[in-house]
Image (cartoon, rainbow, N blue to C red):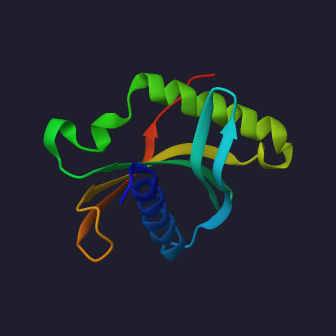
Amino acid sequence: MTTTEIGAWAEELAWNHLHEHGWQLIERNFFCKGGELDIIARKGSVVAFVEVKYRKSQAMGGAVASLTPKKQRRLIHSAKVFLQRYPSLSHLDCRFDLIAISGSDSPHSQVRIQWIDNAFITSG
């Protein structure tokens, strides 16, 4: 699989996991100048901007360690742009989640899905 195919596969796994837990899809792969949001989902009065990270192994901190401060700033920027485009959602509680997937990149092998809600907090 190419890296693009692996990314799409990981995002599909993440979305299925969210959906199984009662989340509704708002949008996938929201692009704006300066960033991207992998999954935007809603459950009740909460909107989650979900970053999906895949790493084959846990070496070097695995997928969780890849959510750097620079990446967090880009996610915050992208979420602000999204909420400006969809002001009807701006009154809801918003948070940033991380779904870290590790394991083989084969659709038929076992993977580990780690969902961290409120993965980081913004100020302002």
Can residue 44 be seen in this snapshot?
no
Residue at image position (23%, 62%) is 104
Residue farthest along the front direction in this orientation:
2
- Figure quadrant of the C terminus: top right
Q: Quadrant of residue 10?
A: bottom left
The quarter of the image holding the N terminus is bottom left
Quarter of the view holding residue 85: top right
Labels in figure, total:
0
Residue positioned 42% across, 23% down in the render: 69
94 vs 42: above or below: above
* Front-most of residues 4 and 14: 4
Task: Give coordinates of residue 122: x percent, y percent.
Answer: 54, 28
**Residue 100 position within the rendered picture, expressed as x and y whole percent measured from the top left:** 34, 51
Name the residue rendered at 56%, 28% in the picture. Answer: 74
In this orientation, which residue lies closer to the viewer: 120 or 26?
Answer: 26
Residue 72 image point, x, y percent = 48, 29
Q: Is residue 86 left or right of residue 107?
A: right
- Pick out the residue farthest to the left: 59
Give residue 83's quadrant in the image.
top right
Horizontally, residue 59 falls left or right of residue 108, namely left
Eyeballing the image, is 120 above or below 9? above
Q: Is residue 48 visible?
A: yes
123 left or right, relative to 44: left
Eyeballing the image, is 34 above or below 102? above
Q: Nearer the viewer, residue 8 or 68?
A: 8
Image x and y of residue 102, in percent: 26, 56
